[in-house]
Image (cartoon, rainbow, N blue to C red):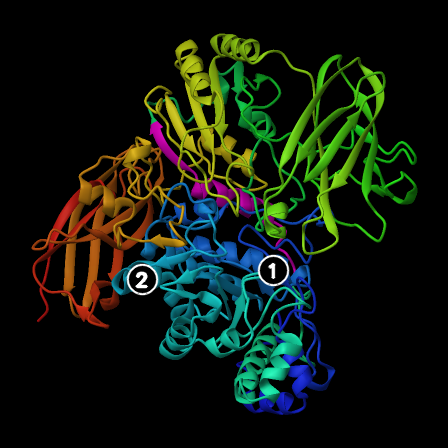
Amino acid sequence: MPRRQPADEADLTRRLEAMSLKEKVTLLTGGDAWTLTPVAAAGLASLALSDGPVGPRGTSFGGDTPPALLFPSPSSLAAAWDEETAYETGRLMGLKARNMGIHVLLAPTVNLHRSPLGGRHFECYSEDPLLTARTTVGFIKGVQSTGVAATVKHFVGNDSETARMTYDARIDARTLRETYLPPFEAAVREAGAWVAMAAYNAVNGTTMTENRELLTGLLKEEWGFDGVVVSDWQAARSTDASALAGLDLVMPGPEGPWGDALLTSVEQGRVPESVINDKVRRILRLAARVGALDGMDGPGAALQPEDTHARMRELAVRGSVLLRNDGLLPLNPDTLRKVALIGPNAIRFAPQGGGSAHVTPEHVVTPLAGLRHVLGEDVEITVHQGVFPHSKLLPLDAATATDPVTGAPGVRLEYRAADGTLLSEEHQDPAAYWFPLNLGEGVEELVARTRLTLQDSGTHRLSVLGTGHHTLHVPGQAPQTHDELQEGDDIASLLLNPPSHTFVFPADRGETEVLVRVRPQRNLPYPITLLGLGYDVPRGSDEGELDAAVAAAAEADVVVLMVGSDADTEAENVDRTTLALRGWQDELVERVCAANPRTAVVVNAGSPFLLPWADRPAALLWSWFPGQEGGDAIADILTGAEPGGRLPTTFPAAEGDAPVLSTHPVDGRLDYTEGGLIGYRAYQASDTAPLFPFGHGLSYTTWEYQDCVVTGDLTRGLAVEVTIRNTGGRAGREVVQAYLEPLDDGEPRRLVGFASVEAGPSEAVVATLTVEPERLTTWSDGGWVARSGPHRLQVGRSAADVRLTAAVPRSS
């Protein structure tokens, strides 16, 4: 581990004074997209930053991203309801970051699940501020224990993606303080986060990168944050206003609103040099913490534990939530002869969501591989996709596409002039897409040529990812064309959600060379573009494939049916428009369950969806986006591993039941008119029953809640001891949840504490919960005040399943 000690402020002053004003200002904008400019005079090495919330990706984005570790999604981590699990996740990510040469991990994302339609719902922890805060604290402490900085983001009000660069979140003071700020406050005051990221959006009329009230007044002065405030990428849009507000670092670089413009502002007296010095000192302090100053051990000195993959597999088990079980699970492999694995997510397993958090995993354990590992070779496993809900094809793979010039897997990419003259060419390996493709002087057309090895005759599908005028040429067939244009010049939109068009063409089994011509759209602020090719084999009609899946289900001893989402449906930069599963997935579940009552449905998704058939399968497991070891984790649970998760967010029974659905600003404003009534608190206030409540999750055993003892009061805080007994025949894990409910004003109860315990059969254990005084206060007239009036503590298994109630002593 690195040599670490608190930053020597006198040493930082010496280094600061060794820098020229030009060097100082240059340091405050990224040297490129992911690193800072080194300053030899100060002994400062270049700091490297990397996304993200499901593991460090490295200092690249796109087709050349190196393999990395893909962890379960943050919503899965929060579903563990366990700070130690969050710490372990953060520690493993921090160790991997050090091995990759990364100083700053751009995680965690602690915005709340305000709406189930939020595009980055999967990347955030919970709808509840306390559960989010406790998960955040554990994660940050774990990351920073390795000498890597954690970045708490996106500060603040970035709880949806629609028009995220420009919307103004209107949030009243009490709602902001009690609901949306607590995770950030815990990250700073308790976990000691070294970096915070200012969001794109505005809050109450002021863009966050220019919001002095929140960046300086609250974050730095009231909370005492001594780290670096970095802009979200391209979020800084002004010079003086953002510099004076408290922003410390503009990313990406080297272009941006600071640079020479900020140097001029200092020289002309609009921005005091003392402001610049404070920003530079913060970056130097960060460098000291992560080992980027001379004489320190920087990244690369840590060893990844040999059992990292096993730990990641257990993390996925710990976060998976068993929503229903009529006794089908756990399966006994010794009694099975034939298992039907059915569903779109059984074939196209979704280990992660989409956007900047995306990493290229070193491998992905599929559900089929996981089942084969636990069932052995004697059990027959049939596989049927059944329905095809995906909006995009999978990228070309090495077995299908080869460069017609070199014979290597991939594509021959040519850069041509308007008259067809070849200007340059290169080989591209198979990838989700290739970016950036530089459109140098005279380049008007890209030509992608590849030799496809077709395993079957029939109708084949080839998709083109990106924007522009596309033409597909297949030997012996008429060219097909398609125009795909992007509105505006937001490069993030192209990168994070590239559009796709699918061409279809008939072809016989064998080899055929296809050619795609692209006249790129040139409205981006840089002379670059993005291109990707996807492919899918011939298949039967949707009706025929569905019938085949149902027939296979009827013949099996048990069915594992996997439906859900993918990285195109749940992604950064776009909110969902519906909670319904895409395509014919609902019909698939209904028909398979009717054909075989011994069906376990596994939902592979990062955020809530409507499940109108939820009472039909014998078992229902929510796996989230479980990371690279997800297939093994799902198989472990199906065959007996204790499903550890509890829902960190409420699942609605109908779309109209969700208290907040709209993520679309009106006239540039996004009004949080619901106040703090989001999630389970809103369901209580409206007396609406969800499909599955916040905190819900089953065990493979049963639990009896026997006693609850509460000491303390509303001023001093509470100590709660809850005695529970495992009344089943298996060892298990239970999450004991405590909710505070006022009795005199009708305010819905809120989570104030939780603890997880484990017990063997017939064993009684005591869960101890500590409720700090701060959790018992409310924001009023510009300050925190203790609650008054009668309150009771409700203890149980979820927000809707209360087992014990105790009076809370009033303040003495």
Query: Which residue is found at the position 35% from the left and 40% from the top?
Result: 732
Reading the chain from its start, which is encountered first: label 2 or label 1?
1
Query: Distance of mark 2 from mark 1, alpha carbons?
Result: 34 Å
Q: Is residue 781 above or below residue 689?
A: below
The three-letter code of the residue at mark 2 reads: Leu
Question: In the rendering, at what x and y percent does residue 246 appear?
Answer: 48, 76
Q: Is residue 774 above or below residue 77?
A: below
Q: Which of these two is toward me, 43 or 305?
A: 43
Name the residue beneath numbered marker 1: 95
Q: Which mark is residue 176?
A: 2
Question: Horizontal placement of 730 versus 306: left or right?
Answer: left
- Quarter the N terminus occupies: bottom right
Label 2 vs label 1, nearer the camera = 2
Circle 2 crowding by C-alpha within 10 Å: few under 14, some 14–19, many from 20: some
Question: In the rendering, at what x and y percent does residue 118 appear?
Answer: 43, 45
Q: Is residue 370 above or below residue 144?
A: above
Question: In the rendering, at what x and y percent does residue 712 appear?
Answer: 15, 66
Circle 1 crowding by C-alpha within 10 Å: few under 14, some 14–19, many from 20: many
User: Regarding mark 1 in the picture, which secondary structure is present there?
Assistant: helix
Q: Check if residue 547 falls in the magenta segment.
A: no
Is residue 145 in view from this perspective?
A: no
- Quarter the C terminus occupies: bottom left
Q: Is residue 811 above or below residue 315?
A: below
The three-letter code of the residue at mark 1 reads: Leu
For the record, the magenta segment spans 303-324
In which quadrant of the rendered view does residue 789 lie? bottom left
Q: Which of these two is toward me, 715 or 20?
A: 20
